[in-house]
Image (cartoon, rainbow, N blue to C red):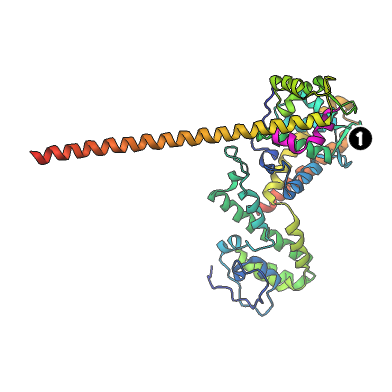
Amino acid sequence: MEEKPFKASLGSHGSDKSSPDNDIRNLWTRATLSQPKLNVPRSSVGENSDMEGGGIGRKSRRWYNQKAGRDSDGGWEEWDDGEDKGSFKQEDLNESSLLELELRRASSLGSRLGEDVDSVTDTEMSSSESSLSISKHTPHRAYWMEQQNRLPLPLMELMENEALEILTKALRSYRSGIGRDHFLTKQLQRYIEGLKRRQSKRLHLLVH
Amino acid sequence: MSATMKLKQGSFLWYLYLDKLYCLLSVRNVKALLEYFHLLDVHHNNTLNDVLFYHFLHHVTSWNRTQIMIVFNMLDWNAMGEIGFDQFYMLVCILLAQQNHLEEQFIFRHSRPVFELLDLDGELRIGAENFHMYNFLFNIKKQDLRELYHDFDITGDRRLNYKEFKLFTIFTMDKYQERQKAEKDKDKGKKDLLKKKRLHHVNVSLKQFLGINVSESRL
C-alpha cells in the first residue's frame, strides 16, 4: 500500500483541533474528481476521526472513556483500554465499509459503478477511490448527519443481545400463559425473528 | 427479601451511571435508555406489559418475583397494566442509585416523586407498612425506619405527610455526608500512619547502615 499523503484541496472547515487532512469524512464530503489517487494509511482512518462536533469513532470512544465517578464497578472505564481502542478502530473501519456500500447503492451511475466495482481490490483505498468518484452525486451530508445521531454500534449490539435474551424468555411465558396461537405470542415471535435477522445481517457485513 | 440489589455485571444498565449530585441520567444515557426501551416494546405501544417487565427485571437484577411484582404495581400508577417510559426511567434511576449506594442522596433530591410512589392510597400520607414494603428499593434499615417514625412524626398520627418526609430526607442526607466525611478522615489517617511507618523504617535502615560504616572506619 502506498503511503502517499493525501493532499486535499480542502477548505478550512471550522474544526481545527485535529488535522482535517487525515479525516475520513473529508474524503467523502470534500474531495473532487481532480483529486490524486488516495492512499490514506489504514491506521489513520480510525485514529483521526476525533473531530469536534461529530464522528462515530469519537462518539464511541467518548461513551466508553467517560469516568462514571465510581471506583470499583468499572462501568465505562472497562472500555478505556488500548485493546478496546483497537476494536474501535475496527469499528470505524467497518463504518466506512458500510458507508461505501450505502453510497454504491445510492448511486445512479450504473455502468460507471460497475467499472468501479470491477476495479475494486481487497484494499479499502481502492474502494474509497471508487466511492469518491460518485460522492458528488450522493446525499453524503444527510447520511453523516444521521450517523452522528445514532448510538455507537457496540452499544447497539449489547442492547440487542440483551433484549433478545429477555424476549426469548418472555416468549416462553407467553406460550405457557396465553398459548402459541395468540396474536401477541405470534407478534413477539415475529419480532424476535426480525431481531435475529438484523443481527446476523450486521455480523455478515462486519465479516465481509 | 434481601435488601441489597445488584445489577447483573455486563448488562446494559450496568454501564449507565447517575450524575452524583442530581441523581439523574445524562441526556446521552437517556437516549440510549429510550432505544433500549423501544427494543423491549415488542407490541409497539410505547409500554411494557407485566410479562416483559418481569423478564427484564429478572434478567438484570437479583430481585425475586414478589419484589418485581411489587415494583410493577408501584410504578403502574395509572393502573393500566403497563409501564411507560417515564416510569421505566424512574425505575432505572432507582436501580442505579442502589447500585452506586446513592439511596440517601436520591431520596433527598427527588423527595416528592419518591413520596408519591410510596403513597399508594393517594392519601398524602405514608404509613410504616408502606415503607417496610419498599425498603428493598431504598435500602432503608429497620432501625432507621423506627427512628423515622419516632423522630419525624410530628403530627403524631403514625404516618408521615410530605413535610415530615422531607425533614427525614434532609436528616438522612446529613447523616450520609457525615459518614462520608468520617470515612475520608479514616482513610487519610491510615495513609498518614503508613507514611510514618515507612519513614521510621527508612530511618532505622539508615542508622543501621551508618552504624556499620562507623565501626568499619574505626577498625
The residue depicted at 74 percent of the width and 47 percent of the height is B32
Residue B51 located left or right of residue A118: right
Q: Residues within 10 Å of mark 1 (few under 14, many from 20)?
A: few
Magenta-drawn segment: B104-119
B107 drawn magenta: yes
Residue A65 located left or right of residue A140: left
- Specify the amino acid type for callout 1: Phe
Which residue is nearer to you in this view: A27 or A108? A27
Disc 1 designates what residue? A183
Residue A157 located left or right of residue B112: left
Residue B54 at x, y percent in the picture = 79, 29
The residue depicted at 52 percent of the width and 35 percent of the height is B185
Secondary structure under badge 1? helix
Residue A206 at x, y percent in the picture = 66, 52
The residue depicted at 68 percent of the width and 35 percent of the height is B102
> Which quarter of the figure is the N terminus of chain A placed in?
bottom right
Image quadrant assignment for residue A187: top right
Q: Chain of mark 1?
A: A
A198 drawn magenta: no
> Which quarter of the figure is the C terminus of chain A placed in?
bottom right
Image quadrant assignment for residue B10: top right
Camera sees residue B143: yes
Image quadrant assignment for residue B57: top right
Which residue is nearer to you in this view: A5 or B99? B99
Which residue is nearer to you in this view: A173 or A111? A173
Above or below A28: residue B93: above
Above or below B14: residue B138: above
Residue B171 at x, y percent in the picture = 71, 31
Residue A90 located left or right of residue B13: left
